[in-house]
Image (cartoon, helix red, strand yellow):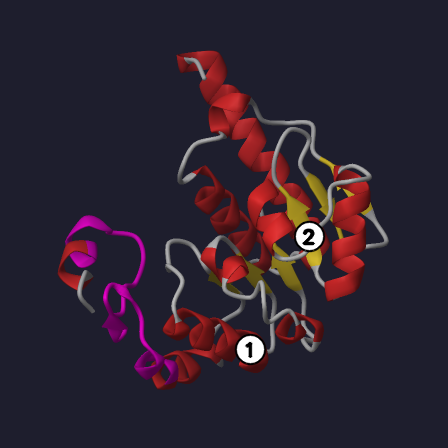
Amino acid sequence: ESIYAIEAVKLNEPVVFPLPDECGMLSIQAIPQILERLSRMDAVLIGCGLGQSSGTLAVVQTVLENFEGPVVLDADGINVLSTHKDILRGRTNPTILTPHAVEFQRIGGLLDNGRVSGAVELARELGCIVLLKGHETVITDGETTYINPTGNPGMAAGGSGDVLAGIIVSLLGQGITALEAAACGAWLHGAAGDICAAEIGQ
């Protein structure tokens, strides 16, 4: 609610609805409004720019436990679950985690045996699809694994991951299955970055 006036003026495309917040982060008081809207959603993305608080954890937990569709969990959505991984393990609908290396390790991923092995192990442990961002992004459900060939170092900038998460949730909303949405989203995101790098530089 505290930034609603700014968002409503600046963002023309999305439908913006204000939610109760505390110190600029979602409040537990936002949960009833979120629950009321979940039944009308095809896919959900949560985590980008939320900050870490008890309210954020409560909202993320509510979405994961009540939404009967695919969820993309990014950034602070991943961070707040680092000590509550049981919430992920108990989910029966597809969940896509999109961590960078630090978030990956924070939620329990190990890189000792390489990125692919670590992503596969975490996907199996949590019952999620893991999209481990970085050079040759790894996308896996623990059984099938894709390595993305697109993208460049210029994309390692704040906000780039939010765009990736948005692409993935848009593909989910169009009915593409979760693993394929994650893999296609990574490819499209990287390809767009490569086009930009070729035209204007990294």
| Quadrant the N terminus occupies | bottom left
Residues 155 and 183: in front is 155
- Taking the image as shown, residue 127 lies to the left or right of residue 23, namely right
Q: Position of residue 102 (x, y in %)?
A: 57, 44
Q: Tell me what residue is drawn at x 19 percent, y 60 percent.
A: 3
- Disc 1 target residue: 67
Write down the region rendered in magenta: 7-31
Q: Tell me what residue is drawn at x 27 percent, y 69 percent.
A: 17
Residue 193 appears in the rendering: yes
Q: Position of residue 185 (x, y in %)?
A: 60, 43
Q: Is residue 1 magenta?
A: no
Q: Tell me what residue is drawn at x 38 percent, y 82 percent.
A: 31
Mark 1 → mark 2, Cα distance in angstroms: 19 Å
| Quadrant the C terminus occupies | top left
User: Residue 147 sits in which quadrant?
Assistant: top right
- Disc 2 target residue: 130
Indicate the secondary structure of the residue bearing disc 1.
loop
Q: Is residue 51 above or below residue 185?
A: below
Q: Position of residue 178 (x, y in %)?
A: 68, 58
Residue 141 appears in the rendering: no
User: Residue 115 sits in which quadrant?
Assistant: top right
How many neighbours does mark 2 have within 10 angstroms: few (below 14), some (14-19), or many (20 or more)? many
